[in-house]
Each structure stands twice: as structure tokens, then as C-alpha cells.
Image: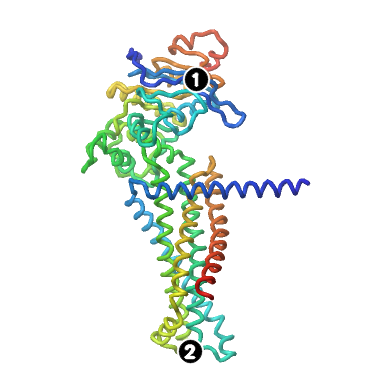
Amino acid sequence: MNTNFKIIEIFKSFLLEIGELSFFASRFFREAFRSPMEFKEFLRQCYNMGNRSLLLVAVTGFIIGLVFTLQSRPTLLEFGAVSWMPSMVSISIIREIGPIITALICAGRIGSGIGAELGSMRVTEQIDAMEVSGTNPFKYLVVTRILATTFMLPILVFFGDAIALFGSYLVENVKGNVSFLLYFNKVFNALEFGDLIPATIKTFFFGFAIGLVGCFKGYYCKKGTAGVGLAANSAVVFTSMLLFIIDFIAVFVTDIFYDL
Amino acid sequence: MTPETPNTKAIITIKDLKKSYGDHHVLNGFNMVLNEGENLVIMGKSGSGKSVMIKCLVGLEQPDSGSIEVMGENINELNRSALDELRTEIGFLFQGSALYDSMTVRENLEFPLRRHTKKFGVLKDTTPLVMEALENVGLADTINLMPEELSGGMKRRIALARTLILQPKIILYDEPTTGLDPITAKEILILMKSIQQKYNTSSLIITHDVDCARVISNRMILLVDGINYAEGTFKELSSSTDPKIQAFFK
């Protein structure tokens, strides 16, 4: 009885959070198209998010490309299909591994950062101070950050994919003596718009989700330093879950249009 | 320091203000009038509704009922842009200073200036106004520092400079001396007094610091259980025999 009650309570609070998040998202769309446009702050956020995540995305992408190729190679050799390696790696990385891994890294790096920053601003009354000074804090802090993550994530994914393919090429070059030109010729021959376009579109949604949840958790952070930690932590957990859900929906929709 | 005689024209009028959070009634019909040029101190215990009242006053919280008139405008009936414009006439000094910690002192002071172009026009060079505000609080040499490089007292002074930069008619102080050592607290009080004299602002000061009330107030309101329990000058209230009032001055 007690367990049932607890499950119902958890489910109710989950639904409540979804409702609040939806309301927060609808406020974002209302505010995003109203003047004044905080263009300078948007650019500053783009620079911060892109620049500061570049190294992490590059290192992760490089290692993924390297490891993926190293582990797949023996199996492909066994079937005499090692020449398919560039095609297989490129399709896997462009369609799925690149976007989801980069998005998860950014959820940890950017999403938690936004949650902690806005949470700390809420706790120290900086958001109230902004409001009292006649500035709309939602527009200045939230809209700019969500737009920045939405536009920067596709760029980071594109960059991460390129580095991952380069990592894969290095393994092929060392183990199979494959030239740069041959490798990337095979990569581009294997790729179609049907691989690239849906994968790029879903990264915009990933970026939006990272910014939205990070801002939501931080903006409504409860008082106290513990609240800031909780906001940062729950931003990562909630965003990661949301990313997989968006990914599932994206693959489902892509399957309808492109017949995977 | 002797309190000045304020004008009698009301600049803020609060009538029958009520605010609850669930079953917890914070304000139960609070009334208040702040006159032009007056320093009004509101004293109350922690949780008595002082901060909630001051947040209702600037539109950070919505009251359940009652009316708040600031400079003749009922703030609950104003739309966002009208409220933002009215807020340029109200300075708010937060208890924790609330400086934007990702900005330098200069950027903190420029932030409201760049957003309210109606008052000063589009300023190409904000330096003279920023310097004037910093000189008023005696911290002109901190212009390029980050908030983390400042002490608690310096932060409070910079926050005061930020509230002054738009040259407001009203300044609201939320616990201006809390968390400061006695010497710095006294310096802040002297600064508040000199600003009031220089710019002829009206001040509403929320505090539980008796020294602060004694030095700064023209008039005081004691807030108990969400209502104004007693009202008068510091001298009148401190000499009262009512045990509830005496508890504030012990």
C-alpha cells in the first residue's frame, strides 16, 4: 500500500515536472520572437558554449573513431569485408554515434553548467536584481542560452563527426595502409543525404533539449547551495533521458520518410 | 545625526496587503505610506513578512489582495513595459548585494544604463556616469575588478552605486547592514544618509538592526504577524512600555 502510494507520488511529480517544462518551453517561444533581441548575449553564449566544448568533443570524437575501427576490424577481416570499413564507420558515426555521444557530452558539460550558473544566480538574487533593474531575465538569460545550444550543437556534432572519421582513418592507415584520399572517397561514396539530413535535424532538437532543461532546472532552483548542486545534477540526468527519447522519435520518423 | 523633516506627499501607498503561501499567511492586511524625502524603517522578526512585502512592492511577488501604489501608479495593473519603466525610479539594494558575478564592476553599473535609454538617451560613453556613481560610494578604483575580488562591505557599496546610477526617486534597502562588521555597517549607514541628502531620495529600509533604525529613520513601522503592529519615531517606539514593542529594542 505504502509502496503503491510512493509510486503514484513519483509519477505525479514526474507529470507535474513535464507540465512545468512544457510551460517553460512555451514561454521560450513567446519571448524568443519579441524585441529586444539580446543579440550580443546570444553571441557571447555561442562563443562560450562552442569554444569551451571544442576540445572535449574533439578528444571524445577522436577516441570513438579510433576504438570503433580497432574493435570492428578483426570481425570484418574474418568475413573478408574490411574494405567496407570506411562506409560502415561513416554511416554509424554520422547517423547515430556522433550526434548522440556529442549531445550526451554537451548535456554533461553545457547543461550542468547552465543549471549551476542560473541556479547560483537565483540563489544569490542576481535574477531578482536583473528583474528589478527593468531587464527581462527570462529573455536575457534563458532565451539566449537555449538559442545558443540549439545552434551550437549541430556545429559541434559536425566537428566531432569529422574528428571521429579522422581517428578511424588513422587506424585504417596504420593497420591497412589505406590512403587519406581512398578512405575519404569511400566515406563520401557511402553517405547519402538520407543519412546526413535527419542526423543534422535531430541535433537541433538535442541542442534545444540541453538548453531548455539546463535553464529550467537552474531558473527554478530552490534556495540554498544544495539546490544549485541538485539543479546541475538533475539537468544532466533529465537531459540524458530526454536525448534518448528524442533520438528514438527521430529514428522512428526517419524510418517513415527514408525507409532505413 | 538628526532626521530631516520629510514632505508629506505620499510616494508609496500600500493598502490592506495580503499574501499567503498555502496555509501560511505571511501578510495579513499590511498598510504603509512612504512620503517624499522620508526614511521609513520597517522592523520585524525573521519570517514576519518584511522581505515578501518589499518584493511585492517591486513586482517580484504577486500579492493575494490589496493595492500598492508607487508614484501614483497601481503596480498590479501595469503591463510589463510600464512596470519596467517605473522600476527605473526604484533602486533596490539586496541583502546579499546581488552583483552579477560574471561581470566587472563597470559592467555591473553599465548594465541598467544600457537598457534604459529613455532616461539618459543612447550613451556612447558611460564612463562619467559610472565614475560618478563609484565616487559617491568611495570606490572609484575598483572599476575593473570582478565582484569576487571585493569584500562584503565593498560589494554592498558597489550594489548601492548600481542602484544610484539610474538616479531613482525611491531606494529600497533589504537588510543593508546584515552580515557586515559594526564599522562597515556604520559606514554604509553614513553613506545611505549622505545619498539621501544629496539626491533627495525616499528610502524604505527593511532591517532588524536597532542601530540602523536609530541612525537612519524618520519614522518606523513594527511588523508583527504580517500586520503593522506599531508606528512612530524611533524615540516614541523605543520608550514604549508594550512588551511586544520592547522586544525589538532589547
Tell which subunit mark 1 falls on: B
Q: Position of residue A31 (x, y in %)?
A: 40, 47
Crowdedness of circle 1 by 10 Å Cα count: few (<14), some, many (20+)? some
Residue B201 falls in which quadrant of the image?
Answer: top left
Numbered circle sitting on residue A176: 2
Residue at numbered disc 1: B16
Give percent across and percent down for residue A172: 47, 85
Q: Where is A36 relative to A69, above or below?
A: above
In-image side of A48 versus A220 (left or right): left
For the C terminus of chain A, the quadrant is bottom right
Q: Which residue appears at 40% of the width and 44% of the height? A: B101
Q: Position of residue A250 (x, y in %)?
A: 52, 66
Mark 1 residue type? Asp
In the rendered structure, find residue B135 and report the number of the disc placed on it.
Answer: none
Label 2 sits on a secondary structure element that is helix
Circle nearer the viewer, 1 or 2: 1
Amino acid carrying mark 2 in the image:
Gly
Left or right of A238 in this view: A25: left
Q: Is residue A32 something one can see in this rendering?
A: yes
